[in-house]
Image (tube, rainbow, N blue to C red):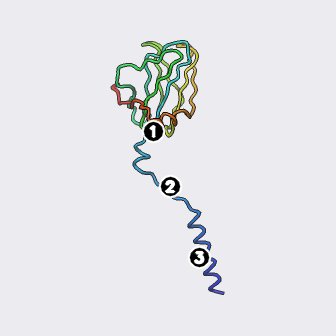
Amino acid sequence: MIKKILKIICLVGFISLLSSCIFAYTNEDIDRYYSVSIENDSISTIRNWYLVDTNTNNLYGREDVYSTVYANDTDSLKFKSNKNYKCYIYFDSKNYFEIPEKFYLNKNIIIRITGSRWNPEYSISKDYSRSAITTNNITVETAVQKNK
C-alpha cells in the first residue's frame, strides 16, 4: 500500500515538474529596443515628435533638432523597451498635441495621426510590418535623450 502511494506521489510530482513553466528575464529582454512609427495621415506637417519616459520625465527623440513628418509620410525611431512612454507631436511652435494615452513599450507600435493641427486625432496599434524590417536587417535610428 505504501509503495502504491509513493508511486502516485512520484508520478504526480514528475507530471507537475514537466508541466510547470519558469519565466526568466535576461539582459537581452531588458536591453531590447522596439520601434515607434509616426504615420502622419493628417493634412498638416508634423514638425517634431518625441517620447517622454513617464517615470523619469526624460525626453527621447531624433538626435537632430527636429523630426519632420510630412503629410502621408512615416517616421520611425527605436526606443528602449519595458518603459512607460507618452508621445508629443508638434505641428509648429504653438500647436502641439499631447497624446493622452500612456503606453508600455514591449512591442513595435504605430501611432497614426489624423485630422489637422487644429483638431488632431490618434490611434495606437501594434506594428506587424516591423518583423520584415528586422528580418531584412534594415536599420532604424535609435532615439537619444534630448535636453528639455
- For the residues marked 2 and 3, what is the alpha-carbon distance in whole angstroms? 24 Å
Percent from the top left, x then y, of residue 138?
44, 32
Evaluate if marks 2 and 1 touch, with contact meaning CB atoms under 8 Å apart: no
From the image, state whether disc 2 or disc 1 is nearer to you: 2
For image coordinates 48% across by 27% down, the residue present is: 87
Tell which of 144 and 95 is nearer to you: 144
For image coordinates 40% across by 27% down, the residue present is: 61
Tell which of 35 and 2 is nearer to you: 35
For image coordinates 50% across by 55% down, the residue present is: 23
Q: Is residue 6 left or right of residue 80?
A: right
Identity, as a three-letter code, of the amino acid under mark 2 = Phe
Tell which of 76 and 49 is nearer to you: 76
Earlier along the polypeptide chain: callout 3 or callout 1? 3
Would you name the residue on which mark 3 appears?
10
Outermost residue toward the front in this view? 136
Earlier along the polypeptide chain: callout 2 or callout 1? 2
Q: Which element is circle 2 on?
A: loop
Q: Which disc number belongs to residue 23?
A: 2
Q: Which disc number belongs to residue 83?
A: 1
Q: Around disc 3, counting alpha carbons within 10 Å, would you say few (fewer than 14), some (14 to 19), or many (20 or more)? A: few
Q: Which element is circle 1 on?
A: loop
Identity, as a three-letter code, of the amino acid under mark 3 = Cys
Q: Around disc 1, counting alpha carbons within 10 Å, would you say few (fewer than 14), some (14 to 19), or many (20 or more)? A: some
Earlier along the polypeptide chain: callout 2 or callout 3? 3
Identity, as a three-letter code, of the amino acid under mark 1 = Lys
Q: Which element is circle 3 on?
A: helix
- For the residues marked 3 and 1, what is the alpha-carbon distance in whole angstroms? 43 Å
Evaluate if marks 2 and 3 touch, with contact meaning CB atoms under 8 Å apart: no
